[in-house]
Image (cartoon, rainbow, N blue to C red):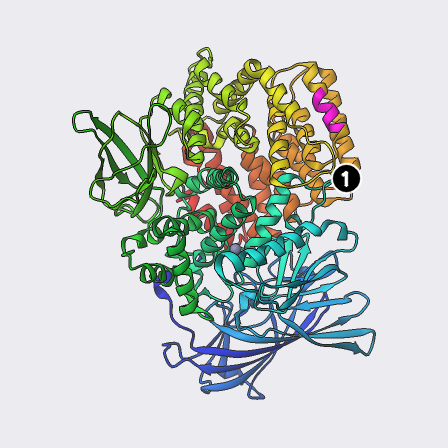
């Protein structure tokens, strides 16, 4: 397949100023008429008009009203090229498309008889021939026509400027977007939908119309999305001085959607998963997800839409920055210091578990990639989550106000433009006067840097030295790395657990500072603290100040000290994770060597005192008690044995339960949240700790705790408690009688919620990740009438959850997991290449497994690679995995 390189960028040969579109909506054949005014770009080396198009039937092509002669244009490999065009022109194009046949969910498609579009990254070219690249920005006017009964609602970007009836039971709506935008932000929605709407007053006093559109029957599930939208609008005004620039802002929910949501100008389209919520169908995690995704898409209006990307290699310019903004939004909404830390811990957990693994595999790429085959494969955790960490490092280096100045300068310089990651870095550098040249390597070099720290204390001179050295492993196409500019936030604790006031030699530290940011820019550097009366315990990489792996030889005692006292809540949690990880690695080795398994009391007691510390927020206690996942443990091994890791972790969980039973029961009882459900942080935190305690309690086969879970399941007043109880019941390994009760609960759950698609997704997910579920069980579940691969949420709920989140079963020795994976990827490839390619990534790390598994994984990969009519999406993933 064709590889596209960043270095080959050339500016477009023609700019487009205005686009007028007319749609005659019909699921079988939609007629699209497009008129664009174009002018030559004198600065481009491209002389022709270059338009992209895919799966289109071209009906008409006219320049200034005259049909273009066959000899003046060509269509080859998805490119319509017109030669000898005048410098200024009006281009008319008519195309015919087939939305009902479009199962890729990119371009114009049909879901539950309604029309939706998804144009990012390159879906607009499935609607009409167009310079479908983000640096071509134009003003759009859109006329929608369709059957009034079937499609009573007709929406597009911007403002509604006309609507009315047409002959034959049809009607029209005309929309005008006052802002110029790239084609990937175009959207239309048509069908039977209803909305919750509200007039909202901006800080400036201007009133705007907010709407949340859903299918009939779902209006009782829109309030949280509406509240999240209002919170987002207010937050962007307050934190960044950014106002909503439209008079109308719409969110539409669709159940068939490839990703989470899409930031189309003024008409955000969302996966129902990130809109619909009420206490009986959505969990606390769902509520938090809705808040952050609504925020994310709204924040794109400035970081992505007003200032967009020059080309898709710059994707992290908008995505990394917008993830940083949505993370800060959620943290600010919780408000408390612990709440912020909890959010930070959750974000870092995702980064480490998924992005660090990506960075160590065959798809590793820089935050600003140098090449791709299929851009849809580059909507990755590296672009999003690592990209956000890169933005966060500016924030750490420049401080709160310094970062804000940088953002202000960025908008001042680039509003209305399509720019590069370098332009963002320049705004941060120029506004602060700091040299951020070396910082560029965070964009150009892939791989997770490792920072090794050594300490030495000199009693005579009362100095404490930290020597930091950095390295970065080779990644595909990048064998040697240059040093990064790494901010390492450090504090020192005395023997009472109190922070020392720091004096860093050669650096002016703010008076009374207890955390300093060391700037590591060379391969190796030593930092010296003076006036240190006694040997301290260092708290390094506070708040996870850089996306690196920190290596420091802490003793268990030091980790216990940090877990008990560190003023930096992130590192307090981190100390507990290090204690747990050390033991999980040791236990896994014991499993592999057939040795007896044991858990030491130091660790158990450290967790006991955290669990019982009522001065700590329940959400923080929950995180400390949550063991590193099996995937995280796997990262510690050169060769991974998923069953051994599973056994070791399960042993740790059941030993903890055995020893902490009384404490867990107390935590359970103290954190009940009777009364009306509220998703607020305090109540959610209580439920989180209570349900964690429940999941532990059921690790030890005992009728009494099983009954506790059963009662919670039967009496739950909300989905958080109901699902937690059902998960615990399903994973319980007790008597046959209990197993029957669990199975009945699972059936009841299905019956009670069979009309709620998002809940049925949970039902499949729970089974996909259940400890007893093997590939055969997944195949059986795939035959269930409620299962379909055509709906991405449903496919993810079973197939992805099994392949990505049930490692010990997926990696079964008989290769049944891999055979299932290959069947699924091949089946999905025909329906929806984007979703297929995501699933294809489950075998990225096949080289990390024992030989016997490697052979089977390689064969499965090869089987997929050899499939005929493989999409370039899947081909890129499996080719890179096999390379
Ligand atoms: N910017 C949006 C990305 C997106 C997307 C990309 C490829 C295919 C389908 C897609 N749906 C949404 C989402 C976001 O980051 O906000
Ligand atoms: Zn985004």
Q: Residue at x 25, y 38 (%)?
A: 503
Q: Residue at x 63, y 27 (%)?
A: 690
* Residue for badge 1: 753
Against 77, residue 535 (above or below) is above
Q: Quadrant of residue 10?
A: bottom left
Q: Residue at x 25, y 37 (%)?
A: 468
Q: Quadrant of residue 551?
A: top left
Residue 87 highlighted magenta (yes or no): no
**Closest to the observer, 368 or 423:** 423
**Closest to the observer, 195 or 428:** 428
**Closest to the observer, 235 or 772:** 235
Q: Residues within 10 Å of mark 1 (few under 14, many from 20)?
A: some
**Closest to the observer, 369 or 211:** 211
Q: Is residue 773 visible?
A: no
Task: Provide the secondary structure element on which disc 1 rests.
Answer: helix
Q: Quadrant of residue 32?
A: bottom right
Quadrant location, the N terminus: bottom left
Residue 710 highlighted magenta (yes or no): yes
Quadrant location, the C terminus: top left
Most distant residue in the front direction: 511
Q: Which residues are magenta?
A: 708-714
Image coords of residue 15 (percent x, y)? 47, 78
Against 688, residue 404 (above or below) is below
């Amino acid at each position: 397949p064709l590889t596209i390189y960043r270095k080959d960028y050339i500016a477009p040969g023609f700019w487009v100023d205005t686009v007028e579109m007319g749609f005659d909506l019909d699921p079988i054949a939609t007629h699209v008429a497009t008129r664009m005014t174009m002018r030559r770009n004198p600065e481009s080396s491209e002389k022709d008009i270059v338009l992209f198009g895919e799966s289109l039937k071209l009906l008409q092509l006219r320049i200034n009203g005259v049909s273009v002669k066959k000899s003046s244009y060509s269509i080859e490999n998805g490119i319509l090229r017109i030669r000898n065009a005048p410098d200024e022109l009006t281009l008319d194009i008519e195309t015919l498309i087939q939305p009902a046949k479009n199962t890729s969910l990119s371009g114009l498609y049909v879901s539950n008889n309604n029309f939706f579009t998804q144009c990012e990254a390159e879906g607009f070219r499935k609607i009409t021939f167009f310079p479908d690249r983000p640096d071509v920005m134009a003003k759009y006017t859109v006329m929608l026509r369709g059957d009034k009964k079937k499609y009573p609602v007709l929406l597009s970007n911007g403002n509604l400027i006309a609507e009315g009836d047409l002959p034959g039971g049809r009607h029209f709506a005309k929309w005008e977007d006052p802002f110029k935008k790239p084609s990937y932000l175009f959207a239309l929605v048509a069908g039977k939908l209803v909305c919750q709407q509200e007039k909202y007053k901006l800080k400036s006093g201007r009133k705007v119309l907010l709407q949340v559109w859903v299918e009939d029957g779902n209006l009782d599930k829109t309030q949280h999305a509406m509240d999240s939208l209002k919170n987002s609008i207010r937050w962007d005004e307050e934190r960044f001085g950014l106002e909503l620039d439209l008079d109308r802002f719409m969110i539409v929910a669709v159940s068939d959607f490839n990703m989470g949501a899409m930031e189309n100008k003024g008409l955000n389209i969302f996966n129902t998963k990130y809109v619909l919520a009420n206490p009986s169908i959505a969990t606390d995690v769902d509520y938090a997800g809705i808040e952050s995704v609504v925020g994310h898409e709204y924040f794109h209006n400035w970081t992505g839409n007003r200032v967009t990307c020059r080309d898709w290699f710059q994707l992290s310019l908008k995505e990394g920055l917008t993830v940083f903004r949505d993370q800060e939004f959620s943290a600010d909404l919780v408000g408390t210091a612990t709440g912020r830390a909890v959010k930070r811990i959750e974000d870092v957990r995702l980064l480490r578990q998924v992005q660090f693994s990506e960075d160590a595999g065959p798809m590793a790429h820089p935050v600003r990639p140098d090449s791709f085959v299929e851009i849809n494969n580059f909507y990755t955790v590296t672009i999003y989550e690592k990209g956000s960490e890169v933005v966060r490092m500016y924030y750490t280096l420049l401080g709160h106000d310094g970062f804000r100045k940088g953002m202000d300068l960025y908008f001042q310089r680039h509003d209305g433009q399509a720019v590069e990651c370098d332009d963002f870095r320049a705004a941060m550098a120029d506004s602060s006067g700091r040299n951020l040249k070396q910082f560029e390597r965070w964009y150009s070099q892939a791989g997770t840097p490792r920072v090794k720290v050594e300490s030495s204390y000199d009693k005579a001179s009362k100095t404490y030295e930290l020597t930091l050295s950095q390295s970065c492993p080779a990644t595909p196409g990048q064998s040697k790395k240059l040093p990064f500019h790494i901010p390492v936030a450090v504090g020192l604790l005395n023997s009472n657990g109190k922070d020392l006031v720091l004096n860093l030699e050669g650096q002016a530290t703010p008076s009374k500072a207890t955390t300093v940011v060391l700037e590591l820019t060379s391969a190796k550097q030593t930092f010296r603290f003076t006036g240190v009366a006694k040997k301290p315990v260092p708290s390094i990489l506070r708040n996870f100040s850089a996306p690196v792996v920190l290596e420091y030889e802490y003793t268990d005692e030091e980790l216990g000290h940090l877990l008990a006292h560190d003023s930096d809540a992130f590192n307090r949690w981190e100390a507990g994770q290090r204690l747990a990880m050390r033991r999980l690695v040791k236990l896994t080795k014991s499993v592999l060597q057939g040795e007896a398994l044991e858990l030491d009391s130091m660790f158990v007691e450290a967790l006991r005192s955290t669990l019982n510390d009522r001065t700590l927020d329940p959400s923080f206690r929950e995180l400390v008690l949550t063991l590193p996942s099996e995937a995280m443990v796997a990262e510690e091994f050169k060769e991974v044995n998923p069953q051994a890791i599973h056994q070791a972790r399960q042993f740790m969980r059941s030993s903890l339960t055995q020893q902490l039973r009384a404490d867990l029961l107390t935590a359970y009882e103290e954190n009940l949240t009777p009364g009306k459900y509220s998703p607020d942080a305090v109540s959610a935190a209580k439920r989180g700790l209570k349900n964690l305690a429940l999941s532990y309690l059921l690790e030890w086969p005992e009728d009494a705790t099983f009954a506790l879970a059963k009662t919670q399941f039967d009496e739950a007043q909300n989905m958080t408690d109901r699902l937690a109880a059902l998960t615990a019941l399903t994973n319980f390994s007790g008597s046959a009688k209990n197993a029957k009760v669990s199975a009945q609960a699972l059936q009841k759950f299905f019956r009670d919620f069979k009309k709620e698609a998002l809940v049925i997704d949970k039902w499949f997910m729970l089974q996909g990740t259940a400890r007893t579920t093997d590939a055969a069980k997944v195949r059986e579940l795939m035959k269930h009438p409620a299962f379909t691969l055509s709906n991405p949420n449903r496919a993810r709920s079973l197939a992805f959850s099994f392949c990505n989140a049930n490692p010990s079963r997926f990696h079964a020795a008989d290769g049944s997991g891999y055979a299932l994976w290959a069947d699924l990827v091949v089946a999905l490839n025909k329906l929806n290449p984007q979703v297929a390619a995501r699933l294809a990534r489950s075998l990225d790390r096949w080289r990390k497994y024992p030989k016997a598994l490697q052979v089977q994984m390689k064969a499965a990969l090869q089987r997929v690679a050899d499939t005929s009519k493989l999409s370039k999406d899947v081909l890129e993933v499996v080719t890179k995995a096999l390379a």
